[in-house]
Image (cartoon, coloured by chain):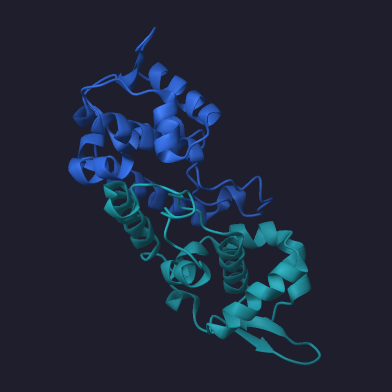
Chain colours: A cyan, B blue
Amino acid sequence: MHWMNLNKQTDISLRVLMHLALNPDELSTISEIADAHNISRNHLMKVVHQLAKLGYVKSVQGRGGGIRLGCPASTINVGKVVRATETTLNIVDCVAFDCLFTNKCTLKTALNQATDAFMSVLDDYTIADLTKNRRQLLKLIS
Amino acid sequence: MHWMNLNKQTDISLRVLMHLALNPDELSTISEIADAHNISRNHLMKVVHQLAKLGYVKSVQGRGGGIRLGCPASTINVGKVVRATETTLNIVDCVAFDCLFTNKCTLKTALNQATDAFMSVLDDYTIADLTKNRRQLLKLIS
């Protein structure tokens, strides 16, 4: 089995969305976000591209262009973002570990239930909830 | 932040305990478990040593010796085993990722809540629960 391990892309996605939610009245640039959060530009661009495809981010082309949220922060559910950015949310990758118990494994059932519980907490949060302490967070990224 | 990632040691610990629970009336050897589950002997010995220190495994020395559960499978709580074998159960390793939001981060709060929910599901299981389908599992490891 392989255990729960949300990936770096999910981490970056949430931070980008939080960043944009903190700056609702302006366009942010890739460079600005990359610098503010110490994220590689390449990695960031891939993530933003995917977030745009999902509708969470809107890109404005041209001079003075940049990105902003594609919908209100209060409508962006954290659990949904995590599910969308995770390619494998099955913590239990029994095949990779060559586990003999595979199909008959009751541990797998327990872990899947645990993962559901984990995700269902995240389902209760929106990006707006995560950026409620706007003033404090803005101070940190400026 | 760094996400939930339970380690290989936890995986092996649970499989060892399940193996021993499936064979309550005999001593199992390291070689036998290593072979049955395709685990390296070295890794396995470290895990067994820790499980013995925790009281979950009892070692019988000498010829014909081996290991068995140190207490009834029905008293071994899966959540407790996971907590004991995980060195860091904080999914949120904000420092490693150089995250600016660190101390003010509401995402961290959400993720900690989610982890608690994850663990509290595992707290509802014992090793006996995981090996209820004994006959099916025994067939797989023999």
Residue drawn at x 74%, y 77% is: A29
Is residue A89 in view from this perspective? yes
Is residue A25 in view from this perspective? no
Residue drawn at x 61%, y 60% is: A8
Count of marks, rendered view? 0
Q: Which residue in the rendered view is the most extreme toward the bottom?
A: A62
Q: Nearer the viewer, residue B35 or A141?
A: B35
Residue A37 percent across, percent down from the top left: 70, 60
Residue B69 lies left or right of residue A23; in this view the side is left
Residue A75 percent across, percent down from the top left: 43, 78
Residue A64 lies left or right of residue B98; in this view the side is right
Q: Which residue in the rendered view is the most extreme toward the top?
A: B62
Q: Nearer the viewer, residue B140 or A107?
A: B140
Relative to residue B63, is residue B134 depicted above or below? below
Relative to residue B67, is residue B140 depicted above or below? below
Q: Nearer the viewer, residue A114 or B46?
A: B46
Residue B46 percent across, percent down from the top left: 51, 24
Which quarter of the rendering shows the C terminus of chain B?
A: top left
Relative to residue A1, is residue B9 depicted above or below? above
Residue drawn at x 40%, y 31% is: B33
